[in-house]
Amino acid sequence: MLPAVRNAEDVAVTMALGTVQNALSQGISEAQVSLMAKVAEREGKIAGAVANIITSRTGAITRALEKMHPYYAELAAAKLAGTQEGIEQASKIQAGVLTLELFVGKNVTVVDVAEGEPADSSIPLTLCQKKLVVDEEFSAWSDIDEHFDFRSLSAFLKALKDNQGLVEQIFPTERCVLVMVTTRRFIDYGDTWANAENNEKNSIVFLMVRNGQNIKQIYSPVESHLGASRLFPSEDEQQGHFRGFDGTTIKFEDVAYTDRLKAHDLMALHYRRLLIMLFGLDQRLALFGQFYPQHEKANFLNLSFQERYFHFLHDEDGTGLLASPDSQTLDEFISEKNSYIQPGSRLLCNWRELMTPRTAPGAVKEDSGYSGYSFIADPEDNVSAAVVYRQGDTLAVDVAVKRFSTDKMFNCKVNVSAYSPWRRGEAELAYLCLDAVGPEELTRFIQQRKFRSNHLFYIRFFKAAIKFLEQERENELPHRQYLLAAMQDSGMHLPGNIQELIHQCIASWKTGNRGVSLAVGMSTEKGRQALLNQLYRLTQGASEMVSVIQEHVAASGSQLLRAGVNSSGNYVAFIAPKPYECDNRLEAHAWVHRVVYATGKRNIRETGRSWVSMPERSASEITLWEDEEQSRKWYSVTPVFSSWTEKQKLFEMCEKGAGLLKGAMGTPDDEEYGDLLEMWGDAYIACNASGEHVTTPDMFLPVGLIKSRKSLKLIALGTCSTEHWMYARAGDDDSRELLLELYTSWYEYPDKARARLLSMAEKNSGLRFVLLEGKSRKLERFAVKRPEEIVNWHAGNLKEIPTMLNDQWACHMAMVSQNDKVYLTPDLLDDDGLPNFNGVTRQVPGEGYQPVNVYEFESDYFNAVYDADGKKVALCHWYDVTDNSYSAEELIGNMPHNAFKFLQYRLDNIEQAEAFIKYRNRNYQPRENADWPEPPEGVKRYVIRARS
């Protein structure tokens, strides 16, 4: 019997109902894919028509047989359900069949990048899991900037064609497939439309295929491919590997893409489609070369085939890979190297990032532009090296700049300590300390892929640093050879790491000599001797000398923290202070002894001792021994004082200020006032030696210090109106007239100036507390130049300043934060340890002084408070004002004391107290309630807030 002839549609139906493996193994073309789609569509329409007929007849059938057994109604519903399943099955098959377009290459674009010899047939096909990013990979090879986007891909592909090194960087084997994207960054193109369109193009994912010297780029139209985060799933995503997808069991409905698939199904869908596309590329174009026997060509989707001829490289989740020995992150590396910064350190600076209005106001000014600032003077180079120096409490460097307006060159100071990124999220690396950095370390961070996601931040800068360091080493080579030869000619036994020790000594010498070049140092006998001394200390008996230092320190009853060699070749030790040596005023002592030793044949002796902050690291000294646990206790301490010496100066200033303050409010005798007037007159003349407007000297005398977290302020007592203060202290009319004559002599209209002083003399004759920057300065009775950083202490909380200084101090102490610490010089305390400003200054109360105590109580409004009787307390914020003294317990009665914050103020009179309360509580309205607790007799209560 002759076999039945099957038409094309029958064949298409058979294929569509079978598995993908069967369809592909029989051979399939783009025309057959189209026919299969049409057949699936037709079958779907037929099933839909049958469903419509059943639906239209179901009502009539049900009404005719409504008295019959419910079985028939259920039978009708079952028929309808069956046809619905048929519709859904046909739809799935229709969508899945279209996936075969991937196999036949419809809308799959293959771009030739490079051509050459294929890989050896013994090399398996490697599938790389991790999605690579073009700009991150290319940045390690070429200098690219923030403008690199999809339009720059041609430069990358050309470099890939021309440079085998870049090929080896991208592709781990000679035969492999990996997925790439142009950039992961969002690039701002200036407007919303351009941002949306161009960033969408930047995020397009494509495949890269290598077969020996042949390289291809592949674009696929399938949405699931475009959104892929990796080429195949990680262990976290799916229990089974990608190789667990056996292509022989994939049916067309398995590869149908619908919005209703769950997240896991979507993931599986992507990898199934990828497998089909790879099969098609192999069958049609032999894109991967010959890597399996020809007779197994049709088994590409078979699981056993993949296990034999595929290699799955888990370069993202790390499965099966060796652990990386490098655990230090990029940020940790940069922080470690920059922790070496000290005066004399060499910094490689990215001037366009480091210079901001905050760090370099002489060359950069704020404006309303995109960056927030603009340069008024341009640095000669974008990246160059500079030597750090100390200026006050800060570290700074100088850079040569050219002013735009005049083309004049000048050195601009750049405050490194003040640097912080001006624009959040867009910063590049601003500087790197070169004291302890080698080009090999920098190269490692460029080559390792895991760091390059932040390539714009550091890679171009690291390349500049490598170039600088390698050039420096080349220039230093003759001097390094000289040092090595000198040590070899000495006849001493040298360790195997002598080259590394030479490098350490050179780095230490440079830092210790303010960044002077090695060539300059080697040109002098002193420089050569210092370097050779270092090498001698490190190579000859270093461990024995450490033992000698340990014994010497222990004999004095002290604790050795660290021993080493400094840049001059002398031994140096860091020693913990003894308890009685510590200055714990205002904060715990934070400094250790740094001792420099000279060595004899059998002993050592001190040649210098100083208080220093314990450095965690120092490139100017080479450590030989350290007690790390004890050292950490000291170098982890950050005092608010810049140094031990500065701390002593500040406390001495407070003592001297108190001395100058004595008698400040009393009436001096004629001789005293004459001396005072002479000092004031000299300062007044100095104030007006230049300028267009008349100014008078100020008087701010430091009396204490306040520490707030990491900041330090001087507390000073004085006035900006010294002419009024001087007028009030004059003992007779002649003295007052002499002051008025001197004061008005600088004015164009003396009579008006005289009238103005007389009208304000009484009101402004007092002193008040102010805050100054916490740094030492020249102390004078009258200051010619007013400090820029001066502020009135708690000016926002006091509408009127109490007349008496003791009362002022009490108010300030009530307003000080609980986390702040205040120091008042002992010279201003009485025998009971209480502030005695009134007595020291001989201040006498004026008319209308009827002092009152103001007590403030406040609790959390939202947390209920109950009194001793279990009754809910309505009051939560109030003031009690009285001319008597009460304790908090007496005023609060049977309410719980620990539920309220308690503050106490002292003001001139009841009027000033009421003004104070209303100023601090702008919405205050008098309130009374019979249910509220009554205050003690003689106490007036002002309720600010109460619970209903």
Image: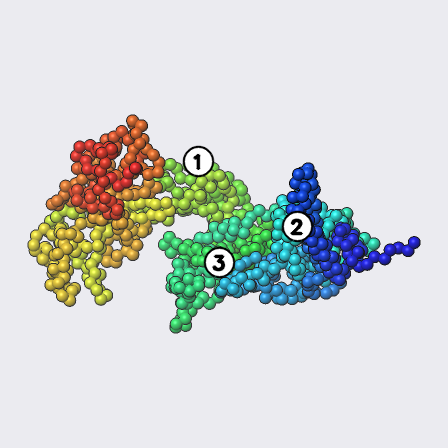
Q: How far apart are labels 2 and 1 at the CA level?
A: 109 Å
- Tell which residue pokes out farthest to the bottom in this image: 406
Q: Is residue 694 above or below residue 923?
A: below
* Residue 94 place in picture, x, y as percent: 70, 55
Amino acid tagged 2: Ser
Q: Count neighbours of disc 3 (C-alpha within 10 A) and say few if under 14, some if 14 to 19, many if 20 or more.
A: few
User: Is residue 97 something one can see in this rendering?
Assistant: no
- Could you say which disc has been placed on residue 153 in the image? none
* Residue 921 place in picture, x, y as percent: 26, 45
> What residue appears at the point 20 percent right and 59 percent down from the top-left corner?
696
- Could you say which disc has been placed on residue 555 in the image? 1
In the rendered image, the quadrant that contains the N terminus is bottom right
- Could you say which disc has been placed on residue 426 in the image? 3
Amino acid tagged 1: Ala
Question: Between 469 and 820, which is closer to the camera in this rendering?
Answer: 820
Q: Count neighbours of disc 2 (C-alpha within 10 A) and say few if under 14, some if 14 to 19, many if 20 or more.
A: few
* Residue 561 place in picture, x, y as percent: 46, 41
> What residue appears at the point 71 percent right and 54 percent down from the top-left corner?
46
Amino acid tagged 3: Glu
Q: Which residue is mark 2?
A: 56
Judged left or right of residue 795, residue 520 is right
